[in-house]
Image (cartoon, rainbow, N blue to C red):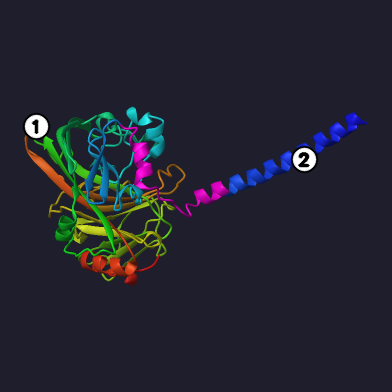
Amino acid sequence: MRNRLVLKIKAVVSIITYLLSYKALVLLITMISLLGCNSTFTLNTFGSDLKVLNNIDDIHVLKSENTMVAVSGGLQGRVFTSSSSGLKGKSYGWFNREAILNRSFKNKFSNLGGEDRMWFGPQYGEYNLFFESGDTFEDANSRIAPDLDTLQFKIKLKTDKEVVSTGRMHIKNYQNYVFDVDVERKISILDKNKIEQNLGISLGENVSYVGFESVTSMTNIGVNKWSKNTGLISIWILGCIIPTKNTIAIIPVTGQIDEVTNYFTPLDDSRIQIKDGIVYYKADANYLNKIGILPQNTVPVFGSYSPGLNLLTIVEFTFENSPYYVNSKKENNTEPYAGDVINIFNDGITQTAGPFGPFYEVESSSAAKELEVGEEIIHTSRTYHFEGDEAYLDQISLNVLGVKLSDRVKL
């Protein structure tokens, strides 16, 4: 009798365990589905992100009033993230936390992300820097130049306001031409007066703000002048930003423009619209795509708005009228110097790539030049974040981007 009771109890326990396991499995699948849909994203505080970043030996925090910017000079002058409200403020930049926590970044840091990092272009085409000579331009064949992946920069200067670091790099293109370059990165935090002066705005108490500047110089230290016939390279600045499902990029343009350069996947008017000289592009990290703006349509400032976060992001950069902007189109790339100046990358998934973050990426490129030995290219990029009610952000957006946020196209 007792044995039967024990068996019955075991049977009941087994059934309960199964049901609980089944419910847990359903819950887990539901959570994964929600995450896979990228329906919401949570911003960490700057303080919690800093705890992760402190696993990097030379992480350094620039400070001005209540604003903070986390930088690594050694990891090629990389800005990881920033805050407009100190340690308890939102952390605006996306970076690869897993690679830092498991220490894999020690051997490979091209996938670390961050709010401002340096690469070189072009990515595709006959003079590209991301494929070995003869390889087809399939995602599986893509590689990062070893010096971009592993070369630690030497720190020249480090203060509360700026970090300067430098490194000598050897970059080989698809034609096996090697560029010998000396690179310097200077990262500076911007105070309120400088932000107001740069953008021609006035900041009130109802808006929190942070701004930083990267100045990147690239000098030809080889033995020959660079030639367009063997390929040219440009400075390419990329910034990974935390997305939301309603984030929209806002890009003022000039001249007649009916379409943008489109990469990787098709677009429709649910993801991009052009109206009254503004390109509106959905940056929700839920559809892998990238757009570009050609030099003839470029205004050297653009931004994004996340209404759920009351967050306006602005990027401005140096821009010159030049016939040489490297072309990174994957298909039909017959004009190697007819490329974009501005790009927005939106994370997502295709059959062969992604997701990478989740993040969306704000990008600008310098012109390419046939540099003599000893000559340099300098590219400056400034990133700003403004947090506050839409009514207060409206005037900033109108002054800088030419449209009120309340009047924006909603995608």
Tag 2 secondary structure? helix
Pick the quarter of the image with the C terminus. Answer: bottom left
In the image, residue 107 lies in the stretch drawn in magenta: no
Which label is found at residue 16? Answer: none
Seen from the viewer's position, the closer of residues 233 and 402 is: 402
Q: Of tags 1 and 2, which is closer to the observer? A: 2
Region rendered in magenta: 31-56
* Mark 1 or mark 2: whose residue is earlier in sequence: 2
Where residue 349 sits: x, y (%)?
Answer: 45, 47
Seen from the viewer's position, the closer of residues 13 and 132 is: 13
Q: Residues within 10 Å of mark 2 (few under 14, many from 20)?
A: few
Pick the quarter of the image with the N terminus. Answer: top right
Check disc 1 and report the residue beneath it.
Answer: 224
Where residue 313 sits: x, y (%)?
Answer: 29, 57
From mark 1 to mark 2, how far is it between C-alphas? 77 Å
Check disc 2 and report the residue beneath it.
Answer: 15
**Amino acid marked by disc 2:** Ile
Say which quarter of the image contains residue 272: bottom left
Classify residue 382 as left or right of residue 98: left
Is 136 situated above or below 408?
A: above
- Residue 101 shows in this picture: yes
Residue at image location 39% in from the left, 38% down from the top = 97
- Residue 232 shows in this picture: no
Where residue 15 sits: x, y (%)?
Answer: 77, 40
Seen from the viewer's position, the closer of residues 250 and 126 is: 250
Residue at image location 40% in from the left, 43% down from the top = 356
Does the residue at mark 1 contact the one at mark 2 (Cβ under 8 Å)?
no
Say which quarter of the image contains residue 354: top left
Is 381 situated above or below 54?
A: below
**Amino acid marked by disc 1:** Asn
In the image, residue 52 lies in the stretch drawn in magenta: yes
Label count reads 2
